[in-house]
Amino acid sequence: MAVAALAGCSRTRDDRAQRVAILPFENLTGDASLDWIAAAGPAIVGEETTGGTRVVPFRAAQVSDAYSANATRFLHGYFTGHTGALRFEFETEDASRHKIISASTEKGGVLEAMNSTAKRLDPAARPFSTSNEEALAAWGRGEFERAVTIDPDFGTAWLSWVESLAAHGEKAEAVEVARRALDRSQLRSALDRAKIELAAASLAGDPAAREQALTRLTALQPNDTATIANLAETELNARQFRAAAAAFQKILALDPENSGIMNSLGYAEAGAGDLDAARKTLEEYGKQAGQKANSLDSLGEAYFMNGRFADAEKYFLQAHEANPAFLAGDDLQKAAYAHWLGGDLKSADALMKRYLDLRANDPLRAWRDAAWKYSTGRREPAVAQLQAMGANQIATRQLAVWNAKLREAAAPLKQAYQRTPPTSDGQVRTFYAAALVASGQKEEARKLLALWPLPAERGGDPLLDSLVFPTFIELRKSVGLPR
């Protein structure tokens, strides 16, 4: 039985799409005018093999970058000769064995050589979006407008032109070029069209159109982990947690050792309220090298956001024990908040004291202590503590915030909320919910109050942090949610 199981695992590994890092092709001709081929060649091979089932191609500037991206194969190449008589040499290397597993020589035009190389990597490779060598050379040299003038249906050149304009801050021009490109009904590549649609949606700041374009792209290139990750982050930021989790799972099926994606999957599952799945994912993440403390911290946050404060405290303390220096001891602070929300302020104070003792030389120690008191409903001693600091700038500014009546309109807060990732949205989400309640939109606010904000959150204005939990607790009461 063990032999059969091992054989089954071997077949699974062999059947998995290879992650092929396409490195720059070396120009050994001595002719600098052909340098463009060094970058354009890998781009062509990558475009032609993207979307297949046998390989997941990606560009890598050097071998170390390829290893960092978990490549299983490297494609090396160089070319010699001169214009009109080029000779290309290609080698595919197995990344784990450091062994050349295939080699080939190609002669003739750039497109012909790249097409042949792409077909060797994946027989299902599709043609590039131009067959015109003159248009190709213009594109390769960065002359994008000239390239589409020569070949008006050269989708990759249109996309490069849009991206170049956007990168140089010429947004209006980029939008116009994208519109012109999409008006081409005969644009050769459906993939290029989807990419241009994505660029146009991003430039327009249209989240719905962006999500639609990403969905089309993932259908066209189901093995492209970068595109799937883009979609996953889009779904996550839209608080579509189950859809985000499904996208992260697709990435892990292609790249099982991607620890960052494991962590993101755990947060997506927690956001969807599936704590069993989140626990399994984050425990697996913790088995990755160097990720033990972070996995425990993530588990604590997964349980905290779902109101499971005792479990959250347990994981925060385990994270601190695993690595007391991790996050500068913030897990003790998080544990204190979890214990307080569990109903025991006295013991929570003891945990907070441990956290503050770690920061004995921190010039903001007294302010942090006062902010903790204010957060946990002890306004008078918090104010007195800051007043005792005299003309201290942060104490003065914090007192001004506590004495102010913060009222902001819902519309700008909604925009800020939509731009903020859910793992750092506690502050803006709380104040957005407050604005909704103030305007009578309690049902909308209720949705925002289902998940608890995370303590010691990275994001927002530190002077507003101490307002979050008192406000959040009152808001939950006002919409009929338990503390």
Image (spheres, rainbow, N blue to C red):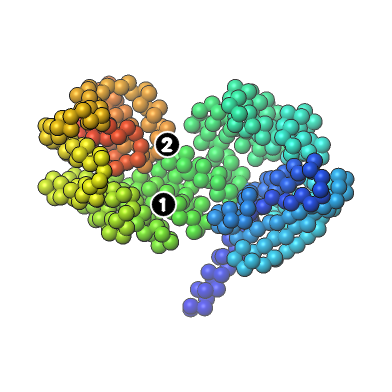
The spot of residue 403 in percent (x, y) is 19, 24
* Mark 2 vs mark 1, CA separation in Å: 18 Å
Relative side of 87 to 353, left or right: right
Three-letter code for the amino acid on which mark 1 is drawn: Asn
Q: Are marks 2 and 1 in contact (CB under 8 Å)?
A: no
The residue at the point 35 percent across, 45 percent down is 271
Looking at the rendered image, the disc whose residue lies closer to the viewer, 2 or 1, is 1
Whether residue 296 is visible to the viewer of this picture, yes or no, is: no
Badge 1 marks a residue whose secondary structure is: helix
The residue at the point 31 percent across, 37 percent down is 426
Towards the viewer: 379 or 126: 379
Rendering quarter of residue 165? top right
Whether residue 291 is visible to the viewer of this picture, yes or no, is: yes
For label 2, the crowd category at 10 Å Cα-Cα, with few meaning under 14, some 14 to 19 and many 20 or more, is many
Badge 2 marks a residue whose secondary structure is: loop
The residue at the point 55 percent across, 39 percent down is 214
Q: Residue extending furthest right? A: 84
Q: Which disc number belongs to residue 7?
A: none
The residue at the point 82 percent across, 45 percent down is 31
Three-letter code for the amino acid on which mark 2 is drawn: Ala
How many tags in the picture?
2
Rendering quarter of residue 451? top left
Relative side of 328 to 256, left or right: left
The spot of residue 262 in percent (x, y) is 43, 53
For label 1, the crowd category at 10 Å Cα-Cα, with few meaning under 14, some 14 to 19 and many 20 or more, is many
Relative side of 326 to 353, left or right: right
Residue for badge 2: 238
Residue for badge 1: 263
- Tell me which numbered mark, 2 or 1, is placed earlier along the sequence: 2
The spot of residue 211 in percent (x, y) is 51, 36
Q: Which quarter of the rendered picture does the C terminus lie within?
A: top left
